[in-house]
Image (cartoon, rainbow, N blue to C red):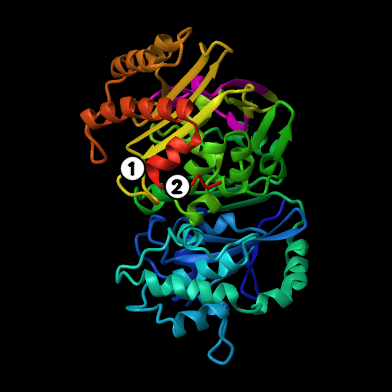
Amino acid sequence: MRQTIRFYLGEDLCTLRDLSPTLTLLDWLRDRGRTGTKEGCNEGDCGACTVLVVRLEDARLNWRAVNACIQFVSMLDGAQVYTIEDLGTADAPHPVQTAMVEQHGSQCGFCTPGFVMSMAAYRKTEGASADDQAIDDALAGNLCRCTGYAPIVRAMKQAMAAGPDRFDAQVEAIAARLTALQDGESVRLEGAEGMLSIPASVDDLAEILLADPEATIVAGATDVGLWVTKGMRRLKHVVPIGRVPELRALTRTPEGLRIGAAVTYQDSRMAIAELLPDAGEMIRRLGSTQVRNSATVCGNIANGSPIGDGPPMFIAANATLHLRRGAERRSIALEDYFIAYGKQDRQPGEFVEALTIPVPARGAQFRAYKISKRFDQDISAVLGAFMIERDDQGRITAVRLAYGGMAATPKRASGAEAALIGRVWDEDALAAARAAVLEDFAPLTDMRASAWYRQTVAANLLTRFFEETTGGVQARLARTGGLVHV
């Protein structure tokens, strides 16, 4: 049992013994004089605090842009962190820094370090493209209040065409450093501000939670981080799970895809999209690159939010949730996990271990639609996810219509489903489903949408689903003028 946190900041090894379990990386960096990392929103929205976190995964270096404002220092054990101060010097700037200067990409300059770090990370992304849409997606988590996006995009294109950066010559050295940190030991720290437990195996995690069921599991901290930075909550015992190899597993089988509790949306996106092609487009709009690099699929489920984007999609796909308490394991239909607002079917000391998405039946049609005020990086007002199966005569043999934002939990539209079973998928069936879905939910009016808007959208999404599943994929492309991005 190790009693220190170890990671690299730039080229320097940091060994921390006395540490608040919820101290954010942003606060820690600025206290150390790394003031290039800025505090803007302090909630993971603006990207001004973006840093690079490098981890050794499957014998390869994984470079991720993350929001330092909601990333706890305690989550960085075994990693290497780079800030804007590490990229280059006045005599030897990083290619992104050179491009930003030459393309006049900086105006007031406050957001610039975050943009530069996101751009540097994007250059490290396998298969990164220099087309406008790909760059916009990569930088959607960085906001420029001076509206200098056009020169920033030009700088990104220039940087993509530039030669190697100084890190390309250090791959072996970085990998060796991180390998030396992988000792397979669990970590335990206790101090005046709380307790920190970092399990090295899923069995260790099970033991920790049996001993202290009130401990707070942290996967990506994109939600828990806000409890601290905005809710000012004090967490007595924090348990980061990012070092548990069993929970980082993404396993494909003939039956489906099993996603461990520590697998991020970014790491699972392509695999999910292989099963559910429309899910790739929805995940593209879930948060930002920085958020998807940290947020986990199972964490989005475990916190039980009625407006989480993942749960309705996976409920429509008939996913199974795997839970563990001590040595005991059980599996339940994902939809049964959500009991009421703020209440889930999880016993004290029990935790989400994985999610399994089954392979859809041959001929099944799946769609997921996110409705929000902003296209990028916004919380959904309504999310609809639908799966339909039909026989050779065109009659509906199975249907799952799931919604988020319409009730206190992610929920299926049971009345609309009943109105469709056994019918031919035609205009009359659509009309029956539209009428029934209005009776399935009594949504609230809040800052994101009125109850009337939510009900109207819920019905209209069924119409969109009908058009797309009866008119082919071109129906969607013709109507939106866009492409389905995987």
Q: Which amino acid does label 1 sit on?
A: Ser
Q: In this view, does 279 lie to the left or right of 41?
A: right
| Occupied quadrant, residue 456 | top left
Whole-percent x and y of residue 332?
Answer: 58, 20
Q: CB atoms at circles 1 and 2 under 8 Å apart?
A: yes
Image quadrant of residue 93? bottom right
Where is 390 relative to 31, above or below?
A: above
Q: Residue furthest top?
A: 422
Instruction: From the image, tell me which residue sits under label 2.
Output: 285
* Dot 2 amino acid type: Arg
What stretch of residues is rendered in magenta? 329-356
Q: Residue at the bottom extreme?
A: 91
Q: Is residue 371 left or right of residue 332?
A: left
The circle drawn on residue 372 is: 1
Front residue of this view, candidates 343 and 431: 431
* Side of 446 relative to 272 (left or right): left
Left or right of 364? Residue 78 is right
Q: Is residue 273 above or below residue 289?
A: above
Q: Earlier in the sequence, mark 1 or mark 2?
A: 2
Corner quadrant of residue 263: top right
Q: Can residue 273 be seen in this view?
A: yes
Q: Is mark 1 on a helix, strand or loop?
A: loop
**Is residue 339 one of those drawn in magenta?**
yes
Does residue 406 appear anywhere in the picture? no
Front residue of 324/271: it is 271
Callout count: 2
Q: In whole angstroms, how far apart are the C-alphas of marks 1 and 2? A: 10 Å
